[in-house]
Image: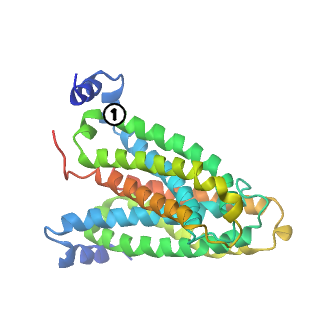
Amino acid sequence: MSLLPLFQWMASVPFFQGTWSDYLGPGLNVVHLLAMVVFTGALLIVDLRLLGGVLKQHPVAPIARDAQPWLVGGFLMLVATGIPAVMATAMTQYRNPMFWYKMYFLLAGIIFTFTIRHRVARADEARLGPIWPKVVGLVSIALWGTVAASARLIMLL
Amino acid sequence: MDLRGAFAWLDVNLPGSVYLRESLFGFPILLTSHVLTMGLFLGLVIMMDLRLAGIGNRRTTFSDLQRALFPWQMGSMVLVTITGLALFYAQPLHYYGKAFFWIKMALLVVAGVNALAFHFTTYRSADTWDTPASVPPSAARVAGIVSLAVWAGVLVFGRLVAYNWLTYE
């Protein structure tokens, strides 16, 4: 099934056409970027802890619990600004391979973060052993780093 | 030579600058590296500031968080600065004419002064106020909120440099 009709429909929504959309795009980009750094911070503080790079004397679970509202809040704001930003430039996005790389890694990132990573960050650390938390932290950073890099490259390559 | 003259001189005389500006992949890779290292740096600064402002990460003390994140913040600051300087190096005159670029630079200075001022005043008495779950005193919270706002400004104006608004010759 092709997603082309969906993107053609998005490109036809009058709300995103006309002069004022010249300001809508940049406005959405700015808020998207602000949400991105909040999300990234909440992600990294836990990933770096899982890797043993920060706060080694502190258990992971309380750090993850503190970070969770910023992670989820940042994520929801990213989605809320990302969807209209795509709608405002639907066909450009559709034709750009970087956009699709971003979407594939985004899907993988969402599934990984809210299943495996969520459990590992709250698990009994003695039972996990030293290897798994590091693997999870590394995979998380690699997945979301790829999302961010391919996102930035959409309009450049 | 005035400032604009200096930028114009840099624009044609920096070795490799034109190559960087015109290359198919050089500039995109540089810009992407700047965004990634920015995310690393600002993400960790925000996590620390939220604790300082008393609105996040309250299960850890501010001092523990600050000490743990500091080497990562400094390392990523070096990387984001290098990639930023390289972007500037690629097209100095382009940035000279952008009001948003200069606002961003001014805000960077404010962010630095705010961090140093806090470090050498309120942070000195951290022993007396910094306990788990505590809300820091108002001077510390103000420093945290100012930092969050100023860094948000740096990010917003940094992004807006890409558009043509308020661009002069």
Residue A84 in sight here: yes
> Looking at the image, is B99 positioned above or below residue A46?
above
Q: Nearer the viewer, residue B156 or B125?
A: B125
Q: Residue B74: x percent and y percent? A: 58, 44
User: Which quadrant of the structure image shows residue B88?
Assistant: top left
Label 1 resides on the chain identified as B
What number of labels is visible?
Answer: 1
Q: Residues within 10 Å of mark 1 (few under 14, many from 20)?
A: many
| Residue A135 can be seen in this image | no
Q: x, y percentage for residue B63?
A: 68, 58
Residue in the picture at 36% in, 32% down: B89
- Between B78 and A114, the one nearer to me in the picture: B78
Under mark 1, the amino acid is Ala
Residue assigned mark 1: B90
B31 or B55: nearer the eye?
Answer: B55
Q: Name the spot of residue A108 as percent of width and height, x first.
A: 55, 68
Q: Secondary structure at mark 1?
A: helix
Image x and y of residue B149, in percent: 42, 61
| Furthest residue in direction left, as rendered | A19
Which quadrant would the C terminus of chain B be assigned to in this image?
top left
Residue lying at 48% horizontally and 71% vertically, measured from the top left = A74
Q: Is residue B110 above or below residue B24?
A: below
Quadrant the N terminus of chain B occupies: top left
Which residue is at a point 74% across and 55% down the rendered structure image? A52
Applied colour scheme: rainbow
Q: Is A24 positioned to the left or the right of B145 in the image?
A: left
- Which residue is nearer to you in this view: B40 or A129? B40
Residue at image point 24% right, 44% down:
B98
